Image (spheres, helix red, strand yellow):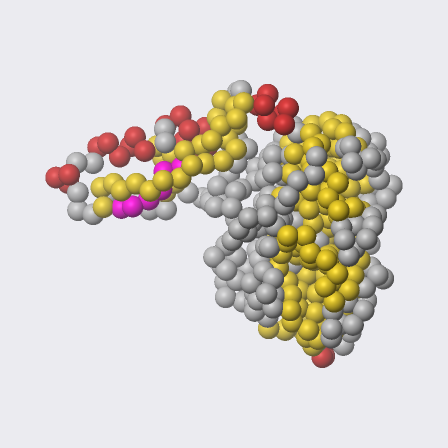
Amino acid sequence: MHISTYIKFPVLIVAILVLGGCTKEKCTKTITTKIHTPILMALSDYQASIKSEAPKEISHTGKIYVKDQYIFVNEPYAGIHVIDNSNPSSPQKVSFLNVMGNVDIAIKGDFLYADSYTDLIVFNISDPRNIAFVKRIPEATSYPTDANGMIVGWRLKQDSMVIGYTVKDTTYCDCSADRDMIYFASAEVAASYKNQAGTGKGGSMARFTIAKNYLYTVNSWQLKAFDLTDAANPAFKSLQTFNTFIETIFPYGEYLFIGSQSAMFIYDITNPAAPAKRSMVTHFRACDPVVVEGNRAYVTIRSGAICAGNINQLQIFDISNVDSPVKLSTTEMQNPHGLGIDNGKLFVCEGQFGLRFMDATSISNITTTKLIKGPDTYDVIPFENQHRLLVSARDGIYQYDYSSMTNPQLLSKINVVGNPY
């Protein structure tokens, strides 16, 4: 289950009670829609649930992160699997961090930072088999969405929060012109919803990253900066806002490259506490992760129900002048998701169409050296100078040796247990 960054806004949020004024005599048309009934958890139970546990099987894959010999795999909204990758041919799960509402991860030294609904959680991972909870910073991030695009983590009452929904179909008489509604089971719910030292390496779909001793997080419309001088106690420093839907963040040198559904942004972090916008490159509405190597930025643009649009491309930009990026080439793709680059070797997740290995050393001749069909791929992380690729796919976590780009070898796969589809 991969994460959608699409939120069902704007919508008209109403209570099912408003339908009572519609009589059969006036009914000219019936509508079938869905009723969303929130699943609640006591705040005290939620807070007590954040802890390290024994390793367990992976039910769904999400974002990935690597640090030293360890792989960290997000299981969307559930937590983080910690895997010892000392032997890439036989990786071993060593622990599980139970973090409800988790989507993103970043690491500096012995400290791991994870979102948990709107909270920022800090863990000490000096002993990956016995990870220690350090602190919780309330309201530091933004509300995540579930696989259906519904916001979770919001508080219905002071002592409870919404952690999911049950959904059922309902049919009612259409007495108005209202459309695109989300119906909740009670007026109370509707009203509440309306008011609401060393670092590792993340993938291209990340919304957390660390650069220059700062943690940067992006949510739907914001970029936040946290000072990590005291790594155990992140200190909020600044907030930047956008007028478009932000999806990903990638650090390179003195800059942050931010992907959105309508543009790629470049922010200067010469002053890391206050990132400053340098430029943007717009495109038709589509999903847009970005990675950078040298003076080139590699961007995948894809279509889909969430991403909209009908473009599926790899675009490469010259960013020698960050104030005026220049598009160098466009390559048609099938449905590109995350991507990675290592010394001109390019890796593109094509979703249900597989995993693409590409030679990007010559801008005028970008070629596919191998397309592995089968895995429904989401994101990748190349292990720099090791010719090894970590892949997050719907049915598991793969590792490939790409010493030969025309014949990459599968080193290992950690399977998802159950039906991932």
In depth, the one of 197 and 264 nearer the eye is 197
> Closest to the observer: 303 or 92?
92
Picture residue at 61% right of the left edge, 34% below the top: 100
Q: Main secondary structure of the magenta part?
A: strand
Q: Residue at x 72, y 79 (%)?
A: 364
Q: Is residue 338 left or right of residue 272?
A: left
Which quadrant holds residue 279?
A: bottom right
Outermost residue on the right side: it is 197
Classify 390 as above or below 198: below
From which residue to which does the magenta span run? Answer: 31-36
Magenta stretch: residue 377 in it?
Answer: no
Tell me the residue at 74%/32% (across/down): 122
Residue 352 position, x and y percent, is 56, 63
Residue at the farthest left position? 25
The quadrant where residue 133 appears = top right
Q: Is residue 298 above or below residue 194?
A: below
How many numbered callouts? 0
Residue 234 seen from this side: no
On the question of residue 46 being in view, the answer is yes
Quadrant hosting residue 130: top right
Does the magenta segment cover residue 32?
Answer: yes
Using the image, determine if residue 17 lies above or below residue 208. above
Q: Is residue 282 left or right of residue 34?
A: right
Find residue 410 and report its horizontal and vertical position in percent: 72, 64
Residue 52 x %, y %: 71, 32
